[in-house]
Image: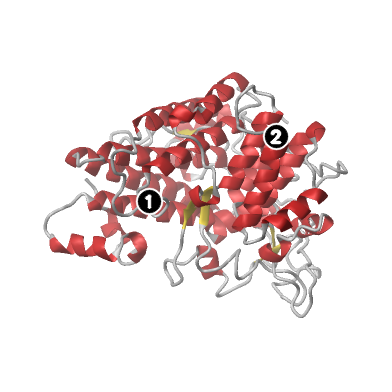
Amino acid sequence: MKLKNCLYLGSLLFMASCNDLQEMNMNPNQPTAAESGQFFTTAQYNFSNQIWDDWNNGRMGMYYAQYWSSTYYSDESRYLIREGTNQTTWNALYADVLRELSESQEIERERQVLGYENRVAIAEVMKTMVFHYISDIYGGPIPYTEALNNEIITPRYESGPEVYERLLATLDQQVGILNASDPGFLAGDIIYGGNVENWKKFANSLRMRIALRMIDVKPTEAAAAIAKSLDPANGGVISSNAESALFRYLAGAPNNNPLNEAFKTRIDFAVSATLVDYLNKYEDPRLAVYAEPVRGTNTYVGEIYGLRQGDAQQSNGDPTRVSLPSANFSIAATAPAVWLDYAEVEFMLAEIEARNLGLNTGGTAKEHYENGIRASFAYTGLSTAAANAYIENVPYVPVRWKDAIGSQKWIAMYMQGIQGWLERLRLDFKDPYTGEEIFVAPAGGSLDQAVTTVPYRMSYPVTEASLNGTNYAAAVQMLGGNNSKGAKQWWDVN
């Protein structure tokens, strides 16, 4: 067993309560079951930092979803990536997060303390989420079945459909194992504090996310997976903001929100004109939560997306010219990293109804659409009355359900850059009331010849070609023969 880097204990002071730490200190020479929780916490922390930092979230997801624009260094907003960062992401998700989860499971299987089956299953559910992120970020084919086998140093890539099939099968199995009569993690579970029922709801909600992602190419399999998620016998889905999967940061470094830390030394991001203009268009009060007004005014001005570096229109982060992300919400020290929330679930249920799948979601497409908006307003601290007034401005449009649901889901997912980008790709939504495009191409043009408007995927790290060449070559063939950001996702048929 590889107890890596002492689990970052020096920096992860939040990962257990004082009582938990005291209990661990009572037996300094005897390993205890709490160690699996330490690995689990470390995995949660490292994963959250990967999807919420100023690189993968700020310079990839938040750009590609056009929530933010670059204020100065504009290469990433024009799709020229930094290969070192791409390599770090790949390594961190495989070598750190997934390995840490495996270590947690290994400890539990060895000791078999009451509830260990739950803890192994919870870690497996989290693995499923991580693999899903990796597969969708890199366009489908990834090392999966062989990825965590220490005996295999050149794991094969499995196709996007194969990965999805295995992810859904894994969730089927883990939902069947999770048993609220036995304990979950007694220490170290930042997301749900050991609540097994909530982990089961998260697993079912994640299964819906995965199923809807592929529904346009595998409708029968997707509908079957959704039906399992909605079956009350399987534990239900996330049904309130209190059940949302959030990684809660602390106020002080190094356990504060990574975007909060990034903004302490430089201002590389402003809220995009794409988002500001759309929210202004329909008098959305969430704009005042998401963004700061231009200093000294009550006006919100977005940064033009994808300007050339040095363009006179670039704000250089000047708050007297452009709206920056809000200090009290977007980049607050304690602002949580969202894994999957209630608003997303309601919008998924709206889509399920809009697609007429014949499944019982407990409401109509219109009702779930409006519930999604209300959930988003509540999460941002706005009132139900404000939500209801706003809904009058943006009524559900059945004949343009993709545009209606997609645009509101995009707004509600603000700060969830990677998921916002992927849903932009999948739903291809426009303004549901005018038919106008919401998104724009980079104003300064793309720096990647394979991409015009938005990347479909991230290219594989260059080291894969040299270290795992044969399998890498097979994966590139699955993508159509080119490891480019212009290779379409297998599930993106529009």
Q: Residue at x 68, y 69 (%)?
A: 324
Percent position of residue 474, x then y = 51, 28
- Cα separation, mark 2 vs mark 1, equals 36 Å
Question: Mark 1 packing: few (<14 Cα in 10 Å), some, or many (20+)?
Answer: many
Task: Decide if residue 228 is on the left or right side of residue 394.
Answer: left
The numbered mark at residue 119 is: none
Task: Say whether disc 2 or disc 1 marks the residue closer to the N-terminus.
Answer: 1
Q: Is residue 91 visible?
A: yes
**Which of the two residues, 247 or 10, is positioned nearer the viewer here?**
247
- Identified by mark 2, the residue type is Ala
Quadrant into which the N terminus falls: top left
Q: Secondary structure at mark 1?
A: helix
Q: How many marks on residues?
A: 2
Q: Which residue is identified by label 2? A: 365
Query: Which residue is label 1 attached to?
Result: 43
- Quarter holding the C terminus is top right
Rendered view: 33 above or below 321: above
Nearer to the camera, 14 or 99: 14
Residue at 60%, 31% in the rendered image:
361
Label 2 or label 1, whichever lies nearer to me, is 2
> Residue 70 placed where, x, y %?
69, 63
Residue ranking furthest to the top? 220
Q: Are marks 2 and 1 in contact (CB under 8 Å)?
A: no
Residue at the outermost bottom position: 296
Q: Secondary structure at mark 2?
A: helix
Viewer-proximal residue among 490 and 36: 36
Q: Is residue 492 visible?
A: no
Amino acid, disc 1: Ala
- How far from the left and from the top, in percent, is residue 330? 61, 63
- Residue at screen point 60% across, 44% down: 344
